[in-house]
Image: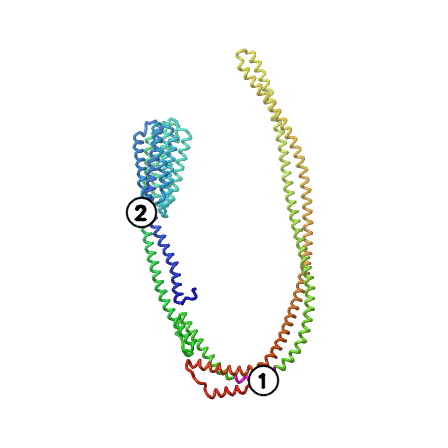
Amino acid sequence: MFKNLTLRSQLHCVIGITLIPLCIFGGMLVHHERRQAADTVLVPQWLIYTQSLQDLAHELQKERGMSAGYIASQGQSFRDELTNQRSLTDTAVQQLSSNSQPLVDNDLPIEAMLHEVLSQVEQLDSLRQAADEFGDAKRILSSYTGIIRTTLNQSLTAGVRCGGNHSATQLIAANVLSQAKELGGLERARVSQALGKDNIDLQLKFYIVGLQQGQEEHLALCGELLDPRYARALETITKGAAAKNAAVIRDAVLASETATQTGYTPSMWWKEQTAKLNDYRSVQQDIAQAISQDARQEANAASRAANVIMILVVGLVIFSIAAGNYLTRYIHRRTHDLEQTITQIAFGQVDMFQRLDEGSDELGCIGRSFNRVLARMCQAAEFCGSSSQRLASQSSQVCDTARRISGLIQDSQAHSINVVEESTNMVQTLTETSIAIKGVSDSLADTSDEVCRLATDMQDAARSAHNAADRSEHASQLVSKNTEKISELSVAADEISDVVELIQGLAEQTNLLALNATIEAARAGEAGKGFAVVAAEVKELANQTGKGADSIREKIARIQAVSENTKTSFDEIFEAFSGLRRATSELATIATEQGTVAERLNQTVRNMADTSNDATETMDQSVSVSEKMLDQLRSIETALSNSANGIEDTNASGKELLEMALEMRQQVDEMLSGSQNQNVEPNRANANAGLVASVP
């Protein structure tokens, strides 16, 4: 269907097909940039939601630490502070619900995340009641930790979903800092618990050390992810006064056995550790403000990029349409002129000396080439006009030559028949000889294949024999090692027998001592009854020890007998494997020698087969050449016969050739003279009539 369109329509189609992917690609770019801008606009909302989660985790950490100190001191510390902190935690929960509403209105997938956090927060009432009743501190702190970890995990998930390259990295760093704060909060709770107890157990110290190491690891990772300015601020905090004072109190707790030895109270520790965590909190807030500002800048940049891309795409489309329309009109005009000129020349409406416009572009090159074709056609027409006269004069000479050639052809035809018969007999003889040699070559090829397979089998047998010899050697080594192990087992059994003899002697002495103790207990009367019972038990234990020693002695005797039999069997197996290894080695040597002989025989048969194949190819070539010569002779015979028949038609064709030459001359004159009808010159017409009359 595309071929039936005009050139102009085809150019329009090409331009349209080119613009379609351009428009699609531009639309995709604009859509991508606008989508990125829309996602970046949502980053502040995600940030507010993430910040609310971190605020809730921060308040829960403080409430957990105060609850630990309250329980450890049995209500003597943190009473009013815990009440105020619970109020702050409830406020953080309400703030989280209100800050998540914009994300829900934008159909963002946070309902499941929010539901998970709020379902965990619902446990706070029961935990607070248990803390007021001085319940199990370990269970209460573990439940608080579960709620905090759920909140921090959801904060990290929200940070990852908000995207934004640099902003996302900083948000993840803030979440890592939240994890460090969580470990610091656990440390605050555990140290407060230790300072509220009389004795500081070792397990609690190990737990505090693990929390400190976890903080250091998270702070190091956070420093790698943070922007350098915030990383420096975080490093300053870790080396500040609050961090140093908290470290001093923690080290004192780790070095003391009781809370009194430390010289610190839970309130003092709480103050320093809370100050350090508040410093971490200030860094988090600074990071949040920076992320919000970066998100707004990224959103504006993405929006500007989308507008610029859209303008560029629209401008490029308009330019492409204008340039394509101009090129289409230009090419259509040039091709239309070319088409009209060719049509006029084809129907004789324009003389042969008309020329097309030439130029440096492709259509100009086409016009230049077409003008050269017209010039060559004019030269050819003039040459045809001059040659037609010579053709007419030579046609009569062709008739005379044809009659002489006819006689020569008849003589050659008779001679070629004799040559064809002799060549046929020679081809038959060569064919029979070639068939016989080919049979010999096939037999030698089959023999070579059999010998080759024999050599391959011998090589496989040699490899198998070598492998068997290696495995026999390996097996004999294993048997030798097992024999040594069994010998060691026998020696160990002898040593165990000595130990059993010693145990037996001890049992007999113990039995004798028990008997003496029984006699002494009988002499003591009522005062020795308890001692008599102990003596009886010792005697019974000595009897059991003697029986156990006898049982061990019997088992060791059986082990020694089995070891001796096994050693004898392994010696026989070793001798058998040694004989097998020698036999397989001899078999491998014989198989290798036979494979070498078979390979030499195969090479000899292969050489004979190659010689036979060469002879067969030579005979086949001779037969092929002879058959070609026979075919050529037959073709010559046929050609001579056809020539003899065709010479008779030459005289009749001469006159027709003359008439055709005259007609061609007339058409050439008309073509060179244009569309006007001109009469042939009288003297040329008379000459043509004379030539026609001279042909017999």
Of residues 512 and 348, the one drawn nearer to the viewer in this rendering: 348
Residue count near mark 2 (Cα–Cα under 10 Å), binned few <14, some 14–19, many ≥20? some
Residue 416 picture location, percent across and down: 65, 76
Q: Secondary structure at mark 2?
A: helix
Query: What residue is disc 1 on?
Result: 400
Q: Which residues are magenta?
A: 392-405
Of residues 185 and 205, the one drawn nearer to the viewer in this rendering: 185
Task: Residue 398: say if magenta.
Answer: yes
Q: Are marks 2 and 1 in contact (CB under 8 Å)?
A: no
Position of the N terminus, as image quadrant, is: bottom left
When the figure is inspected, residue 262 is found, relative to residue 397, above or below; the finding is above
Mark carried by residue 293:
2
Callout count = 2
- Asked which colour scheme the image uses, the reply is rainbow
Residue 281 picture location, percent across and down: 33, 39
Residue count near mark 1 (Cα–Cα under 10 Å), binned few <14, some 14–19, many ≥20? few
Relative to 245, is 613 on the left or the right?
Answer: right
Displayed quadrant of residue 626: bottom right
Of residues 538 and 374, the one drawn nearer to the viewer in this rendering: 374
Cα separation, mark 2 vs mark 1, equals 110 Å
User: What predominant SS class does the magenta segment belong to?
Assistant: helix
Task: Residue 517: say if magenta.
Answer: no
Mark carried by residue 150:
none
When the figure is inspected, residue 483 is found, relative to residue 638, above or below; the finding is above
Q: Secondary structure at mark 1?
A: helix
Visible in this render: residue 263?
no
